[in-house]
Image: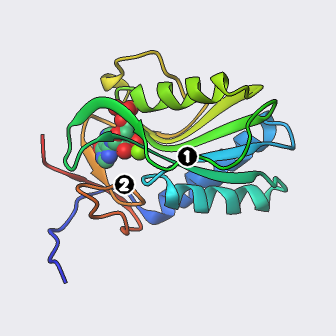
Amino acid sequence: MTEKRSIPVLFTAAEIKERVEAMAGEIAAKLPADFLIVSLLRGSFMFTADLVRELYAVGVHPQIDFMTLSSYGAGAQSSGNVAIGRDIADDVTGRTVLIVDDILETGRTLRYAHDLLIERGAADVKIAMLLEKPNKLEVAAKADFVGFSIPDKFVVGYGLDYANHYRELPFIGYLDVH
Ligand code: IMP
Ligand code: MG
């Protein structure tokens, strides 16, 4: 087993659960009954899994698909280019789509995903972001639902990675890589 350094905690599992539960309520109040979640892998897998269960608890039953986008290489610096790895299987024509993503930094990933789904004929595209770093935004991109606004730290855990490590942490912590 790889040894891992101890990670300072930004949000505990309990704090995340409480916030995700509240977000489900916000989404239930604003979205129509029928919508498709497009979860952006890999970072949002844990958030998506928890969010859909909280949506179920408030009587919302979305369809769910996944898309793999990457703007980062192996490390902590954005490459600036967004590429599709795995695409969604469902047709978005005429649908209300909720993009679920882990973190908004420069905004490039979200901008790309949003524009792609609109181009493909989605009727409406809304965005649920677990985290946002408001000071790092470089392109026009705005989430409709935000879990937490965070300072400019490199965060890991709860799906978020550094070189594909730390995704399994049940809390969100930060690394000193800047
Ligand atoms: P953007 O395209 O610059 O907004 O970057 C968004 C993507 O970069 C996210 O979906 C993450 O995959 C990754 N990312 C940005 N900041 C962090 C971080 O602090 N920790 C882990 N991944 C991050
Ligand atoms: Mg991501």
- Residue 38: image quadrant is top right
Would you name the residue on which mark 1 appears? 87
Q: Quadrant of ligand 1?
A: top left
Mark 1 lies within 8 Å of ligand 2 (Cβ measured): no
Of the image marks 2 and 1, the number of the one nearer the N terminus = 1
In this image, 106 relative to 129: left or right? left
Residue 3 versus residue 28: which sits nearer the camera? 3
- Tell me the mark number nearer the camera, choosing from 2 and 1: 1
Mark 2 lies within 8 Å of ligand 1 (Cβ measured): yes
- Tell me the tag on residue 78: none
Report how far apart the C-alphas of labels 2 and 1 lie in the structure. 20 Å
Q: Amino acid at mark 1?
A: Asp
- Where residue 129 sits in the image (x, y, percent)? 52, 40
Residue 122 appearing in the image: yes
Q: Residue at 87% across / 43% down in the picture?
A: 33
Residue 52 versus residue 77: which sits nearer the camera? 77
